[in-house]
Amino acid sequence: MTEAGGERDERDLYIVIAGVVAKCRKRIIGGETFYVKPPYDGRYRAVFRDTGNAADVEPYVFETKQEAQRVILDQLSDPSPLTWRAFGRPKIYLAGFHVFRPDAVEYGRSLRELCNEYGFEGLVPLDKENYDNLDRRETGTMIFYANEGLIREADIVMADLNPFRGAEPDSGTVFECGFGYALGKRVYGYISDGRSMRERLASGFDPLTGLYSDGMHVEDFDMPLNLMLSVSTIIVTGGLEGCLVQARKDYYGG
């Protein structure tokens, strides 16, 4: 899409969209209003189109970042009703505890590059916005809604479900899988050890009671993770690349 014949407004505006505060500019093309993401080079990689009812969009557009942030933090409106209209490859939300790595930004970039090789666009749940004007709790709230928005935008949720700080996957990652499943997204997970839970935890069983070391039973359904994850998620034994191979087969065939 180009903006030939359209009206140009070069002011940076701020829109509450897909759970985040994003910069945008307003374009009027053929009498219709568009809010476009940078880069503003005439080749819009994603836009939100107002189809005539400006009241649906205008309440989410602000002159300053701070005004837009308060809408989310003060819960003045739902921060996720609008989404960018994306064009191109299917999008994968890359869930996992890699966000806690010291090199999280660089590592996330490598994950996106791998997704690109397999015909997908990777969405990494990392804080891209400058929140220096907010305190830690407010920053956490903004990141929550940002990640929610990315999951809504994605076609697939793909999660690292390896154990994190214990025998179970990262709790935030599990939430994101459940949220994606509830939205009707296809959910994939990858693990390095595909044995059943009972096999993986065998060393912790009391031979007399058959109970685990915490005094409780362990699921025994011949599944590698809790049944709520194992049934709702396409589990691949291996790493992200193995998951991408499977997703490519599912989406593109072959």
Image (cartoon, rainbow, N blue to C red):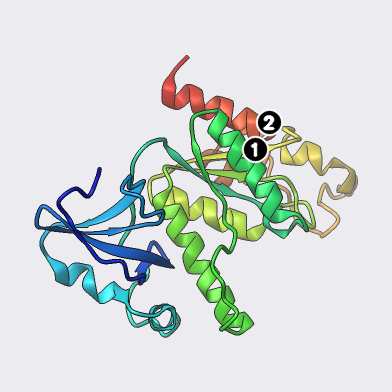
The amino acid type, in three-letter code, at marker 2 is Thr
Describe the element under mark 2 as helix, strand or loop.
strand
* Position of residue 67 in the picture relative to residue 58 (left or right): right
- The spot of residue 61 in percent (x, y) is 30, 73
Q: CA distance from mark 1 to mark 2?
A: 6 Å
Describe the element under mark 1 as helix, strand or loop.
strand
Residue 81 in view: no
Q: Residue shown at 70%/50% (left/top)? A: 106
The number of callouts visible is 2
* Closer to the camera in the image, 149 or 177: 149
The residue singled out by tag 2 in the image is: 237
Q: Residue shown at 72%/52% (left/top)? A: 168
Q: Are marks 1 and 2 in contact (CB under 8 Å)?
A: yes
* Position of residue 244 in the picture relative to residue 17 (left or right): right
Q: Residue shown at 54%/68% (left/top)? A: 129
- The spot of residue 224 in percent (x, y) is 68, 38
- Quadrant housing the N terminus: top left
Residue 214 in view: yes
* Position of residue 30 in the picture relative to residue 211 (left or right): left
Q: Residue shown at 46%/55% (left/top)? A: 150
Give me the disc on residue 177: none
- Give the mark, 1 or 2, whose residue is nearer the N terminus: 1
* Position of residue 251 in the picture relative to residue 219 (left or right): left
- The spot of residue 41 in percent (x, y) is 36, 50
Q: How busy is the neighbourhood of tag 1: few (under 14 within 10 Å), some, or many (20 plus)?
A: many
Give me the disc on residue 190: 1
- The spot of residue 215 in percent (x, y) is 81, 59
Compared with 163, 31 (above or below) is below
Give the quadrant of residue 133: bottom right
Compared with 117, 224 (above or below) is below
Q: How busy is the neighbourhood of tag 2: few (under 14 within 10 Å), some, or many (20 plus)?
A: some
The amino acid type, in three-letter code, at marker 1 is Tyr
